[in-house]
Amino acid sequence: MALVERDIHTTLPDRPAIEVRVAQEGEGEGLIIEFREGDSGGWSTGWGLGSTPAGALAAIASYLQDFITDNWRVWPVCAEHDRGLHATVVGDAAVWQCSAGLHTTARIGHLGA
């Protein structure tokens, strides 16, 4: 999660506060991701883990990308093509891949590096 947060903090000037924790009894399984938007409270959801570390990281990145895109703006964006990036796994690494050029722009956690 820290890798996805690094990408969010590196590339978005206005961003939600994000807290991730393991689900407690009665909350389902996996992770609970909570978003805080100033004093307006927050929103949370359960999220299952992928079968590999790279798969789990790509799944969390994709979920957060959907939330940010649905509530603020398209994120992240390929600097070369000005099109959205998508979280995926290439080999054994979780990466951001351009939807236009079908190229990898960065490993998740290294946007803007």
Image (cartoon, rainbow, N blue to C red):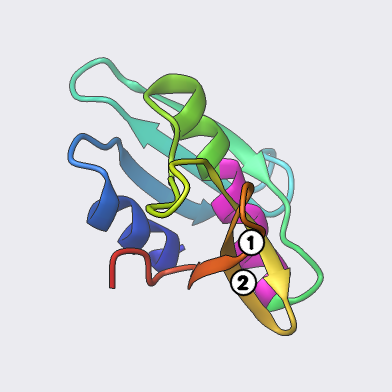
Where residue 27 sits in the image (x, y, percent)?
Answer: 66, 39
Please tell me whether residue 67 belongs to the stretch shown in magenta: no
Mark found first going from the N terminus, 2 or 1? 1
Instruction: Give the Cα separation between the discs numbered 2 and 1.
Output: 5 Å
Residue holding disc 1: 58
Residue holding disc 2: 94
Q: In this rendering, is residue 55 above or below 85?
A: below
Q: Nearer the viewer, residue 61 or 51?
A: 61
**Image point 67% across, 74% down: which residue?**
54
Where residue 81 sits in the image (x, y, percent)?
Answer: 47, 47
The answer to whether marks 2 and 1 mark residues whose Cβ atoms lie closer than 8 Å is yes
Numbered disc 2: secondary structure: strand
Where residue 7 sits in the image (x, y, percent)?
Answer: 35, 59
Q: In this rendering, is residue 19 above or below 36?
A: below
Examine the rendering and report whether any part of residue 24 can be seen.
no
How busy is the neighbourhood of tag 1: few (under 14 within 10 Å), some, or many (20 plus)?
Answer: many
Where residue 14 sits in the image (x, y, percent)?
Answer: 20, 34
**Image point 64% across, 40% down: which residue?**
46
Mark 2 residue type = Ala
Give the magenta range: 54-63
Q: Which residue lies furthest to the bottom in this view?
A: 92
Q: Which of 98 and 36 is in front in this view?
A: 98
Q: Residue furthest right?
A: 51
Numbered disc 1: secondary structure: helix
Q: In this rendering, is residue 88 above or below 18?
A: below
Is residue 31 toward the left or the right of residue 34 in the image? right
**Image point 33% across, 51% down: which residue?**
8
